[in-house]
Image: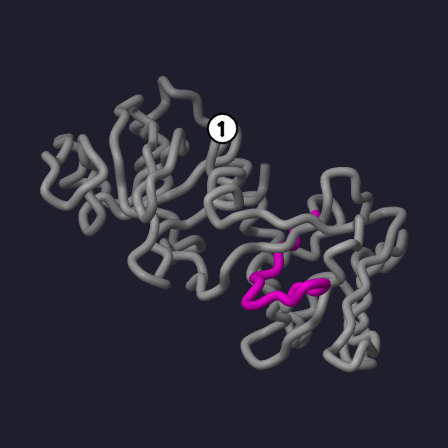
Amino acid sequence: MKKIITSITVIFLSLNCYSQNDNSAHLHYLNQLLEYPFSTEKNIQGICFITPSNDFDYHQDSIILNDKDNNPIVRIAFDDSLGVVTNFNGKVFKSFDSSNPFSPWLWVDNPDYFRLSFECTDSTENLYKVKLNENEFGWIKKKDKNFKKETIKEFILKWTMEPMHLDFNRVTNPLKKEPKYSSIVIENPKVSKYKIWKAESIDMEGDWVKVKTVLGEIGWIRWRDGEKVLIRIDYAC
């Protein structure tokens, strides 16, 4: 993501320019983009997400996480000339540096639209244990006002409800009338030509999410299968 974040931003904004009346053009564009092949989000193995609080201002405040011995391991701060600067394990990385090993579940170090969410794998009475990458963990104090806890349902719906959206493979993950495998599939002739579809989420029941597609159809799709996430999320809005 870090290497191509600028071009992806342009693609997201271009896709979002299509109105409901331009749905055929949107589907064609979404399915033909060689620069943006469909891929699903990371697996979710944790129990919840820890995200910056609603009133947190990354232009003014720094994000600090400690290791298990309460020593600072990550510091994230905004710099007018350098963008989002990450100090991780004593090394400094500027925005868009693909060599940065800091890789939480959601991490977009674009200074124009900063995105950050940690997957929480465990907690104690006073602390959240969060993944910093596949091998390293940090700890966040529960009383730290710069952060808040979000359930997995809250997190997914926040990023996929209007004006945000999700993309899904309608061939392998068909739109259904009800949130169950045995439910009737909502057929559409365009599926034979376009397999990747855009939709907005409306509600969620377990591993199923109720969506409204770009054509205005309302139904249910699987958003995950066990730990595996089956959708792609737009974080650019």
Question: Is residue 117 rendered magenta in the image?
Answer: yes
Q: Residue at x 33, y 26 (%)?
A: 23
The percent coordinates of residue 204 (x first, y second) are: 37, 38
Q: Residue at x 14, y 46 (%)?
A: 181
Q: Nearer the viewer, residue 11 or 204?
A: 204
* Image-quadrant location for residue 134: bottom right
Q: Residue at x 41, y 50 (%)?
A: 232
The percent coordinates of residue 40 (x first, y second) are: 38, 57
Q: Nearer the viewer, residue 151 or 107?
A: 151
Q: Which residue is mark 1?
A: 162
Q: Is residue 121 above or below residue 106?
A: below
Side of 199 relative to 183 (left or right)? right
> Mostly what secondary structure, the magenta segment?
strand
Question: Is residue 206 rendered magenta in the image?
Answer: no
* Residue most extreme to the top: 21
Quick one: quadrant of the C terminus?
Answer: top right
* Image-quadrant location for residue 191: top left
* Image-quadrant location for residue 176: top left
Q: Is residue 101 above or below residue 55?
A: below
Side of 131 relative to 89 (left or right)? left
Q: Which residues are magenta?
A: 114-128
